[in-house]
Amino acid sequence: MQVLAISGLWNTAMAYPNDPEFVELGVFECMAQLIWKGIQNRQWLAQDQNIYIPYYAAHIIGSYTMNREEFAEEAVRAGNISQIERKKVSIMGFLLVFACDHFFFLSADMMLLCCICVLLKKGCLCIQVLYLH
Amino acid sequence: MELLRGQSTWVEQRVAVRALGHLATYDSTFPAVAAYRDILELAIQLAIDAVEIVYTHFLQFVDKRLSYHCDLLTRGMGGLEMESRKAEEWASQLQCWSLQLVNCFAFKEEFLPTICQADFLEQLPCMWGGLVNESSPAGLGVLRTICYQRLGRLPVAESPCIIDALCNIARSSDDWQYMAVDCLMWLLQDSNTRLKVKRLFLSLSTLCTALPSCQLMN
């Protein structure tokens, strides 16, 4: 599930690296946190297909910073933020709009939820897939 | 940075160096990248070791290849041969992208002493993107950035093997031939390095007759 979401986002980042939508939604914070999680929580990394996540996350950051300087500035800001207060999530509001309470409390990994929500909004992920998982 | 430092594997290092290279490209974000004291040394080392790393950690032992590496390389479609071919391509990218990051530092004088270590400088002409990465000026691009600056030209002129390599590339039909010509021109135009590379005059003037766009000595 997690890999499905992130590889969808990876495809989008590769195809539209100049599109500000995901950048505004906090894609850099999201990806930075996923990379951190992979480094700090090896158990999580070894689960399911999570081993792919740090790779995709770093690749996505690279794609969105490829052409636009303002995106790169945003990435640097997000990197700094994620080191100081890693737990706070700027796209929490967005998450709350899209995630139902049930799903919210089931998963401890809010960042992944953000990805899923964002992808849902973009229509990259069908709702049945989300429901099944 | 943690991925670049090798907390994971070479596959993650490759995409980390790509992202950091992009961040280092812009004036506004370069200082944030340069704030990591070890990043330049890491990028230099990665450029030197890239091919070796991919060989020892992937190509060498067919039966020890991590399955997720194989999947990422081939996107789930392809056999052993495809994996190996892509791994070679990624090794070259790991090197080229590391060099791109080094190149961003090479524009700033304060980092030239770190970059201009003889053993690294002398390897630069041999680092090329190959047929799979022909859009990257690779090692020659870094060398050109170094030669563009007075502080960089001195250590380059001290090394006969770099000068020989530059002459060879300048005479070749390499896509990046003009970069080698630029390097040689700047070395000859600088009074501090001119005498050291004087023996090049002959080969360079031969070259200049062949390349009408090339104007020797202003």
Image (tube, coloured by chain):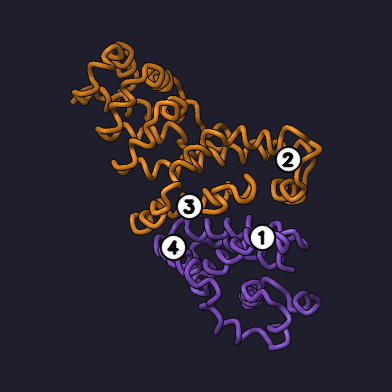
Chain colours: A purple, B orange
Q: Are marks 2 and 1 in contact (CB under 8 Å)?
A: no
Q: Identify residue for label 4.
A: A76
* Residue at 61% from the left image edge and 65% from the top image edge: A34
Residue at mark 1: chain: A
Please tell me whether mark 1 sits on a helix, a strand or a loop. Answer: helix
Q: Nearer the viewer, mark 2 or mark 3?
A: 3
Q: Gap between marks 2 and 1, in whole Å? A: 20 Å
Q: Amino acid at mark 2?
A: Glu
Picture quadrant of residue B111: top left
Sequence-wise, the earlier of marks 2 and 3 is: 3
| Left or right relative to B164: residue B54 | right
Q: Identify residue for label 2.
A: B83
Q: Gap between marks 2 and 4, in whole Å? A: 34 Å
* Residue at 68% from the left image edge and 68% from the top image edge: A5
Q: Position of residue A74 (x, y in %)?
A: 44, 66
- Looking at the image, is A111 positioned above or below residue B52? below
Q: Identify residue for label 3.
A: B20
How crowded pointer 1 is (Cα within 10 Å; few <14, some 14-19, many 20+) is rated as: many
Residue nearest the viewer, comparing A14 with B212 = A14
Please tell me whether mark 4 sits on a helix, a strand or a loop. Answer: helix
Q: Position of residue A49 (x, y in %)?
A: 75, 60
* Residue at 47% from the left image edge and 69% from the top image edge: A84
Q: Amino acid at mark 4?
A: Val
Q: Are marks 2 and 4 in contact (CB under 8 Å)?
A: no
Q: Amino acid at mark 1?
A: Ile
Q: Are marks 3 and 1 in contact (CB under 8 Å)?
A: no
Please tell me whether mark 2 sits on a helix, a strand or a loop. Answer: helix
The numbered dot on residue A53 is 1
